[in-house]
């Protein structure tokens, strides 16, 4: 019985949802900890059938443990060895092996309950998914790098609660040394697919910590064993990522945008393709919020060693997630208001900000109501994909128009460049149907958006939205940026800011995408620059316009050539995507045409039949 | 450049013969495409008059608007297959193909590796046989 107990403890350590399969990585570590030579371990794996099945189910795991015990006692690795009475397998390298044995039952709960009572706040934060972002003291670099090469640190990202359990267990027992270890992981971690929004989110750490603690307690109460169930923290994280790509939580992330985003996770393309297939349920080439959450969750699960399922698990279905998404979306306006104060610390003096946060909450609340109507939207979307895409973005424009009207009343100068972010997002969406009206929209000032969102939106918008007029736009942009100072008229600063903003963010984005170690400091530099810029923005308008471009004039100049190249690549991708959508539409139209043909043929045959009668 | 994006046969013996048949029938498909001017989508294309005494089969062809060709070889002894069914099968193939196209990770011209597509094709073939 002790054997059984021990084995089940170990198994649940390796794989917190007991009924699912143990991830290969954690199992591998456990085996290595048994200090057996690698070929013995290979043998064990083969014998226990894991290789055959591809994962460690409970049976395979127990057999493997038994074989380890056998090997450690000196018995050969064969099936027959299992029949002997063996001592429990020893796992030396696991430092807290003995402690774990005592503490394992507690640990199972400990992961949940100790979180609110964590002695070291840092420790507890580390164990939560966005815990990486929660650590204010650690360098901003570290929490940002989500997936380094070692799966261990990546596990902390959204799944540390369940999936990184061995790590979390270890962390729990040895707070300080593991913190050190993890911080070292983090520091050499910067090589990895960097989901750029994280850097922006670090600024919101103090405020988010409050909300996350709330969440943690929530999470404890409905923690599920299902690896395919998205926890609250994960969901919020995904929603933030979604928002970084697409400010309107009701709209879609287009295929190319999503592709770039998920490619950063460094999973092989066929797997990403499969993940897309699973998560894009309505097969429209775009991801709604629940679809995106599902896709992200699958990516994370895959990264942690879980095999991808053949069909989408029930808990990842969009309908399921949609119902669950309503709750976190309600929290989102709160988070927005939490995170907003940080980037604009001068907000308290800014009337427009408070007004706009209320204005933003209003659209978010309306977004909540519309979430329920999303099914309606999806239905027409299936039939007419092209038409509905502009409809979505028209919806977005309606919302931003409302925000704009609110903003115009207060006329805060510092928000003027946040306004352009919405416009850029709109531009991206409306690019295929209506290129001409777009430039005019850049003059409007609007919403109170987070600086975080500004950066990501603008980067996305720049990559796609500025594409149709790239040749004409680039020269005017550069000239505008150069000749910034004389611009005093109201319109001119607005015109300047969108290009500057776009360039700034395009360069920021480029750095994010290309190289991770330089990217993070660079992004921070941008952020500090942006924040530094916000302070002068409170001064009268003319000074602002001069200070802004002066600070950033050097940046756009350097980055234009690479930007052009990226623009071309983005254009190619976008064209491919448009091609796919058009092919789909085409096929649908052809089907309709076929049906009409059939009807026509039927009618003609009828006519033929009737004609001899009449002729006579 | 008529390289195959996807090829699958159910009775796995004589696969090569089916492959060969499919390849040769591509010529006929091209001929038909060039023949019809405006209507590009052709649902039923070939009834092979060349029937061997030992094996006889019908080859059906279908072309999408982006010049992607679907070729289906069915056994003539399977007389239960009517034209409508063939058409519906092609329609299903076409729908699955467009679903694949919607996947941003799929580059047009790649071999099709989608599991959903495989499943659909398998189920369809099981249904027929």
Image (cartoon, coloured by chain):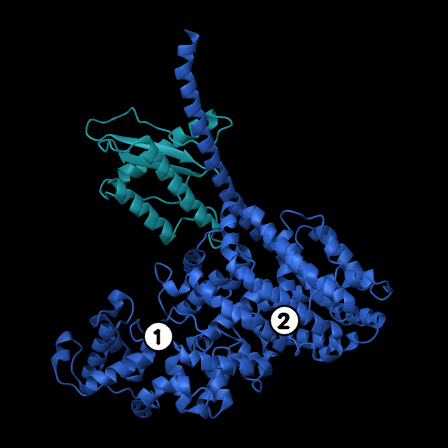
Chain colours: A blue, B cyan
Q: Is A410 or A32 nearer to us in this picture?
A: A410
Left of A205 or right of it: where is A10? Answer: left
Residue to which mark 1 is pinned: A225
* Dot 1: element: loop
Left of A18 or right of it: where is A371? Answer: right
Residue to which mark 2 is pinned: A452
Displayed quadrant of residue A138 = bottom right
Which residue is drawn at the image coordinates 37% and 30% (left, top)?
B44
Dot 1 or dot 2: first in sequence order is 1
Front label number (1 vs 2): 1
Left of A456 or right of it: where is A491? Answer: right
Mark 2, chain letter? A
Mark 1, chain letter? A
Q: Is residue A283 above or below residue A101?
A: above
Q: Residue furthest top?
A: A616
Q: Which quadrant of the figure contains the C terminus of chain A?
A: top left
Residue A313: percent from the left, percent from the top? 37, 63
Residue A246: percent from the left, percent from the top? 58, 62
**Residue A608 visible at all:** yes
Q: Which quadrant of the figure contains the N terminus of chain A?
A: bottom left
**Residue B9 visible at all:** no
* Dot 2: element: helix
Are discs 1 and 2 located on one and the same chain? yes
Q: Is A595 or A4 nearer to us in this picture?
A: A595
Residue A515: percent from the left, percent from the top? 57, 69
Which residue is drawn at the image coordinates 46% and 82% (left, top)?
A217
Q: Is residue A161 above or below residue B35?
A: below
Q: Is residue A142 above or below residue A266?
A: below
Displayed quadrant of residue A452 = bottom right
Q: Residues within 10 Å of mark 1 (few under 14, many from 20)?
A: some
């Amino acid at each position: 019985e002790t054997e059984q107990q021990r084995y089940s403890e170990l198994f649940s350590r390796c794989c917190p949802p007991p009924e699912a399969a143990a991830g290969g990585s954690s199992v591998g570590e456990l085996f290595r900890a048994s200090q057996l030579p690698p070929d013995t371990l290979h043998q064990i794996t083969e014998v226990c059938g894991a290789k055959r099945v591809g994962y460690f189910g409970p049976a395979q795991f127990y057999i493997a443990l038994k074989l380890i015990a056998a090997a450690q006692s000196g018995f050969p690795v064969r099936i027959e060895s299992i029949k002997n009475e063996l001592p429990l397998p020893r796992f030396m390298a696991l430092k807290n092996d003995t402690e774990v044995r005592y503490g394992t039952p507690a640990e199972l709960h400990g992961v949940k309950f100790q979180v609110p009572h964590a002695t070291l706040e840092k420790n507890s934060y580390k164990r939560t998914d966005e815990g990486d972002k929660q650590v204010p003291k650690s360098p901003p670099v570290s929490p940002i790098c989500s997936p380094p090469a070692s799966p261990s640190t990546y596990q902390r990202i959204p799944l540390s609660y369940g999936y990184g359990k061995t790590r979390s267990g270890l962390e729990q027992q040895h707070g300080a040394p593991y913190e050190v270890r993890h911080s070292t992981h983090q520091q050499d971690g910067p090589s990895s697919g960097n989901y750029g929004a994280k850097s922006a989110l670090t600024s919101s750490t103090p405020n988010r910590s409050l909300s996350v603690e709330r969440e943690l307690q929530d999470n404890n109460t409905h923690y599920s064993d299902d690896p395919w169930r998205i926890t609250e923290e994960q969901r919020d994280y995904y929603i933030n990522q979604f928002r970084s790509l697409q400010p309107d939580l009701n709209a879609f992330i287009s295929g190319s945008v999503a592709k770039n985003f998920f490619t950063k996770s460094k999973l092989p393309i066929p797997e990403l393709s499969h993940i897309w297939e699973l998560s894009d349920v309505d097969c429209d080439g775009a991801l709604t919020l629940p679809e995106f959450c599902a896709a992200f969750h699958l990516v994370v699960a895959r990264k942690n060693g879980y095999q991808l399922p053949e069909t989408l698990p029930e808990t990842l279905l969009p309908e399921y997630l949609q119902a669950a998404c309503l709750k976190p979306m309600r929290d989102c306006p709160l988070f927005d208001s939490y995170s907003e104060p940080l980037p604009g610390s001068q907000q308290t003096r800014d009337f427009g900000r408070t007004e706009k946060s209320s204005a933003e909450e209003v659209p978010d609340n309306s977004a909540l109501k519309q979430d329920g109507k999303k099914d309606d939207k999806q239905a027409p979307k299936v039939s007419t994909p092209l038409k509905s895409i502009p409809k979505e973005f028209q919806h977005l424009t309606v919302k931003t128009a409302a925000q704009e009207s609110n903003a115009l009343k207060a006329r805060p100068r510092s928000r003027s460049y946040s306004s352009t972010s919405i416009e850029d997002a709109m531009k991206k969406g409306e690019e295929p149907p209506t290129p001409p009206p777009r430039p005019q929209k850049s003059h409007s000032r609007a919403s109170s958006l987070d600086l975080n969102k500004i950066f990501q939106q603008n980067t996305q918008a720049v990559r796609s939205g500025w594409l149709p007029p790239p040749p004409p736009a680039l020269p005017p942009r550069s000239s505008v940026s150069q000749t910034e100072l004389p611009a005093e008229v109201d319109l001119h600063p607005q015109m300047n800011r969108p290009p500057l903003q776009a360039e700034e963010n395009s360069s920021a984005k480029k750095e994010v995408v290309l190289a991770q170690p330089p990217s993070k400091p660079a992004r921070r530099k941008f952020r500090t620059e942006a924040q530094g810029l916000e302070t002068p923005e409170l001064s009268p308008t003319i000074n602002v316009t001069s200070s802004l471009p002066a600070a950033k004039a050097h940046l756009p100049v350097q980055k234009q050539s690479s930007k052009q190249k990226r623009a071309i690549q983005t254009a190619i991708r976008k064209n491919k995507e448009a091609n796919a959508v058009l092919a789909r539409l085409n096929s649908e139209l052809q089907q309709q045409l076929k049906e009409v043909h059939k009807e026509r043929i039927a009618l003609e045959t009828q006519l033929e039949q009737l004609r001899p009668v009449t002729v006579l | 450049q008529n390289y195959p994006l996807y090829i699958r046969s159910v009775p796995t013996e004589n696969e090569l013969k089916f492959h060969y048949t499919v390849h040769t029938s591509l010529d006929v498909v091209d001929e038909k495409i060039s023949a019809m001017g405006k209507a590009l989508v052709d649902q039923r294309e070939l009834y092979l008059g060349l029937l061997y005494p030992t094996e006889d089969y019908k080859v059906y062809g279908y072309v999408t608007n982006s010049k992607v060709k679907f070729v289906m070889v069915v056994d003539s002894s399977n007389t239960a297959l009517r034209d409508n069914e063939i058409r519906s099968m092609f329609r299903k193939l076409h729908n699955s193909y467009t679903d694949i196209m919607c996947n941003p990770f799929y580059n047009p011209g790649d071999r099709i590796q989608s599991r959903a597509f495989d499943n659909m094709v398998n189920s369809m073939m099981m249904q027929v046989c």
